[in-house]
Amino acid sequence: MASIRKTKKEINELTYHLLSKCYAIRGFESEADSQRFDEIVTKIVYLRNDLIQRANHPENDAESATLKEHFAKVKADLQELAQSFEELKSDRI
């Protein structure tokens, strides 16, 4: 099991990478839909905040029997964060 610090670092790195890519796509495409862009960026930020909160407070997860299960769910949800970028690429804002 990875440490909480490493998990949070992965979450932050992925979020930074995704937001950088979002702004790069928006910068290169002049006809970008600003409302759709805002929705995707907001979704990424909210998911990041939720994942950090869950990583910091695993005792609040009543569904997981063990810490290992809890962090496995956090890692799985981290993949959902990556899916947000795939959604952005497919829509091209």
Image (cartoon, rainbow, N blue to C red):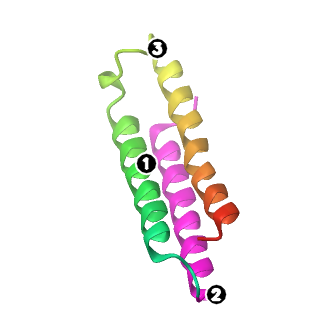
Per the image, the residue denoted by label 3 is 66
Magenta span = 1-30
Q: CA distance from mark 3 to mark 2?
A: 45 Å
Task: Tell me which amino acid carries mark 3.
Answer: Thr
Q: Residue at x 40, y 37 (%)?
A: 55
Q: Residue at x 55, y 59 (%)?
A: 13
- Of the 4 image quadrants, the one containing the N terminus is top right
Q: CA distance from mark 3 to mark 1?
A: 22 Å
Q: Which mark is residue 6?
A: none
Hey, which residue is sitting farthest right in the picture? 90
Task: Tell me which amino acid carries mark 1.
Answer: Leu
- Camera-near label (3 vs 2) is 2
Mark 3 vs 1, N-terminal side: 1
Q: Position of residue 11 (x, y in %)?
A: 51, 50
Q: Residue at x 43, y 48 (%)?
A: 47
Cβ–Cβ under 8 Å for marks 1 and 2: no
Cβ–Cβ under 8 Å for marks 3 and 1: no
Left or right placement of residue 89 versus residue 74 in this view: right
Mark 2 falls on what kind of element?
helix
Mark 3 falls on what kind of element?
loop
Mark 1 vs 2, N-terminal side: 2
Mark 1 falls on what kind of element?
helix
Per the image, the residue denoted by label 2 is 28
The image quarter containing residue 14 is bottom right
- Of the 4 image quadrants, the one containing the C terminus is bottom right
